[in-house]
Image: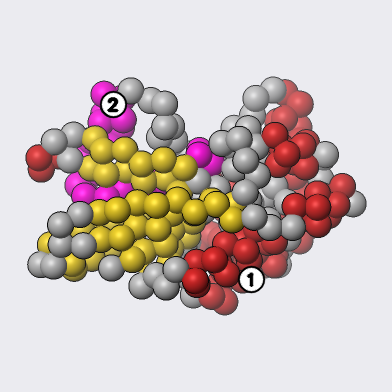
Amino acid sequence: MRLAFFGDIHGNLVALEAVLKDIRTQSPDMIYCLGDIVNGNVWNKETTDLLRESGIPCVQGNHDEGIGRGRTAFPFMHGSLEEEVWGQMAAAYTLTQMTANDLSFLRSLPRTFSLPVQSGGKTITVSGGHGIGANNNKRLYHFLPDATVADAVQGIHTDLLLTANTHFSYYRQIGKGKDRVLIVNPGSVGQPREGSWAATYALVDISEDAVQVRFRKVLYDLDLVMKAIQQSPLPLHYAARLLRAL
């Protein structure tokens, strides 16, 4: 069985369309979105519409929750006071684009869901969440020590934990025996922070004997996206961040 996972789109419709096109070439059995559909680019309504119409199951990211509740200030990462102001400006701009139905859709998304996958008589449980479980603000960074991560996922009984929110793709195994968990972060479609602006997603192949994780990086029309940001009310910070990919 092959599963495709992506997340952290942040209104970057051009990147999302490129990722979905590439995913189709990989013939997955199912596709899942790990949240943060909106906020940070200019196509927030279009991105929401595309995912809603596609029927791809999505979890609710912290930006989806904040925008869905009509907020311009909600918990997300700011490196400085300037970035906090820019973040509130971006959220206010996003809200101008959304209809009541769009906001209702974002509010309706679950924070987590579990997916039992039968493969070769072995059940793999995929627990989706933008952060960890029902907490869509918590982040499992790739650089955290094993002990810290093990403590964070304690009580989550699953073989495979999908998480997003850090915009950095990685996978790692935590624990042993019955407590062993394979953690996978598919990276970011619309705002990667791993040194490249290319959109990133994960393919997970599950067989009787193994689970294989691959990351695919997808190029798209970056110039179009940069120009759209420059011509919008968004702070130029969001265009610069795409170029820096940090």
Viewer-closest of 209 and 192: 209
Image-quadrant location for residue 116: bottom left
Q: Which mark is residue 49?
A: 1
Residue drawn at point x = 64 percent, y = 29 percent: 78
> What element does badge 2 sit on?
helix
Residue drawn at point x = 13 percent, y = 36 percent: 176
Viewer-closest of 68 and 214: 214
Image-quadrant location for residue 46: bottom right
Q: Residue under circle 2?
A: 146
Which amino acid does the dot numbered 1 rest on?
A: Asp
Left or right of 239, for residue 151: left
Residue drawn at point x = 33 percent, y = 23 percent: 145
Left or right of 103, for residue 32: left
Q: Earlier in the sequence, mark 1 or mark 2?
A: 1
Q: CA distance from mark 1 to mark 2?
A: 39 Å
Quadrant of the rendering where the C terminus is positioned: top right
Which amino acid does the dot numbered 2 rest on?
A: Asp
Which x, y percent locates residue 175?
18, 34
Callout in the foreground (1, 2):
2
Label 1: how many residues lie within 10 Å, few (<14), some (14-19) or many (20+)? some
Q: Which residues are magenta?
A: 146-168
